[in-house]
Image: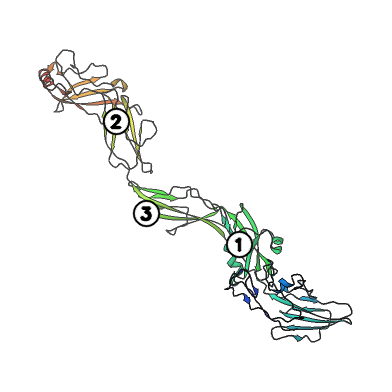
Amino acid sequence: MENPLDVIFFDNQYEKSFTGVGEDPTGDRENAQYEAWLDVSPGEDYYLLINNFSNDNSGFSIQFSGSIFIAYPDTALDCSIISNLLGPPISACEGETVTLDAMTSGATYDWQMDSGSGFQPITGEHASTLDVSQAAMYWVRVTTLAETIDSYVQVAFSAVPVANPVSDDASCSGNSTYDLSVKDAEALKSQSPSEYLVSYHESQSDAINGINILQKQYTMDFGSRPIFVRVTSLNNPKCFDATQQFQLTALETPSIDFPLEGYLCATNGSVTIGETQADSNYTYQWDTGETTPSISVTAEGDYTLIITNAQNRLSCSETAIINVTESIPPQITEVIIEDLRNNNKVTLVVENEDSFEYRLNDEPYQAAHVWYNVLPGAHTITVNDPKGCGAITEDIVVVGFPKFFTPNGDNTNSQWHIEGLSYLENPVVFIYDRYGKLMKQLTAQDIGWDGTLNGKPMPSADYWFKLTYTRASDGEQVTAKYVNNHFALKDDLAFHRLSAENPDKTY
């Protein structure tokens, strides 16, 4: 074989569009891919060998320039492709045997190979075909009575990748996709991802043929299915391994549908937190070390529970953080009843207001502790702790009574009595002086107290009373609470004098 005039190796490391002999047609004088012009002699034939030994079959174009093309535009160059008996360069995989075929009728054959130190005859090889398993440049001389043919071919062998075993895995509910790329490292192990490509397929035949490659962000339905793995050499896509597969299972992730808050009540030193309706397929792990679905705790703080759905060495988990705080049960301090008016108002005062809820009688609970337009009569007020630390109930009576009266016989404000007793069952009013002496006992049928005791007028002073009635819920006789239970008996002359001096003041 004659020595070449020039050798150009173009790996496009400079990312240029052109390579060749002479000058870059774009005028780029910095293009290092170009060699100097060739010196040629008249009468000589020159052959151009183009060896696109690459996996990227993107094509190429050839441009020729020079003054000869101006003088001889049609005959300066013969661009026909020379037929090569052994064919184009061959790329095979390690372990394969390549058969080179130079069959020509009535010929003899001499084979040589160049593995880096020049062409050497291959001893004993004179057949029309040659089986090779070593990377090298091969040359055959075919001799017939009519001619001698020399043919060359390059044979290269690429390493065959190994698809390593890949462990089964789970796609948990709540995740819209499963990232198949997390399995690349298992399939490759020590093999470089810059030299080998990992792809995934839904069938063995697709993996073998390298078709219908799954998106790395893979969406799947519930259930279990095999995923087939193919590892391909980027240097030679014909070299691959598609022997491995793994099982991908869509598991249900445990849901957190229990309260994430717990309350320690002042009257109860512990509270149960966690899952009260456990799933027998799940496991439970608390940061306290316990493994039951729920636990009883006696201290404030955050408690972490990990719930795991595990099947066939696969698992999906969900974590719950439960905050436990102390809650003090409600205590009623006072009930302020503003009555003897068209719009009776009741205001509830609690000692430790802490997100409680309030209810009047059987009405729905409300956040406010004030009620308007409360009808006269007996009522039940309930204060509830929605955190579960109890409720407290009070019976109240909404009635009206004058704050004073003037028993002067003019039939104006001369009698004192409680209004609204008709709304109560068996009401009785007891009136006392400041020393606790009973002045009068009234029922709903009495017209009121005229300010006398045994017919004798009582002095101007404050008097107290209490109200009893029969509780409808259990028939018990009870004394009304939270009633502003004192009033004034005023001397008529003194009252008129005060009224004249203070006409805008209400007594």
Q: What residue does disc 3 label?
A: 301
Q: What whole-number distance in Å separates the C-alpha atoms at marks 2 and 1?
A: 68 Å
**Secondary structure under the numbered disc 2 in the rendered image:** strand
What amino acid does circle 3 point to?
A: Gly
Q: What residue does disc 2 label?
A: 346
Q: Picture coordinates of residue 62 (x, y %)?
A: 69, 70
Which quadrant: the C terminus?
top left
Which residue is nearer to you in this view: 229 or 471?
229
Q: Is residue 94 left or right of 360 when viewed as pictured? A: right
Up the image or down, 184 lies above or below 86; here it is above
Task: State which quadrant residue 400 falls in.
Answer: top left
What amino acid does circle 1 point to?
A: Asp
Q: What whole-number distance in Å separates the C-alpha atoms at marks 3 and 2?
A: 38 Å
Binning the other alpha carbons within 10 Å of mark 2 as few (below 14), some (14 to 19) or many (20 upward) gives: many
Q: What whole-number distance in Å separates the C-alpha atoms at marks 3 and 1?
A: 39 Å
**Secondary structure under the numbered disc 1 in the rendered image:** loop
What amino acid does circle 2 point to?
A: Val
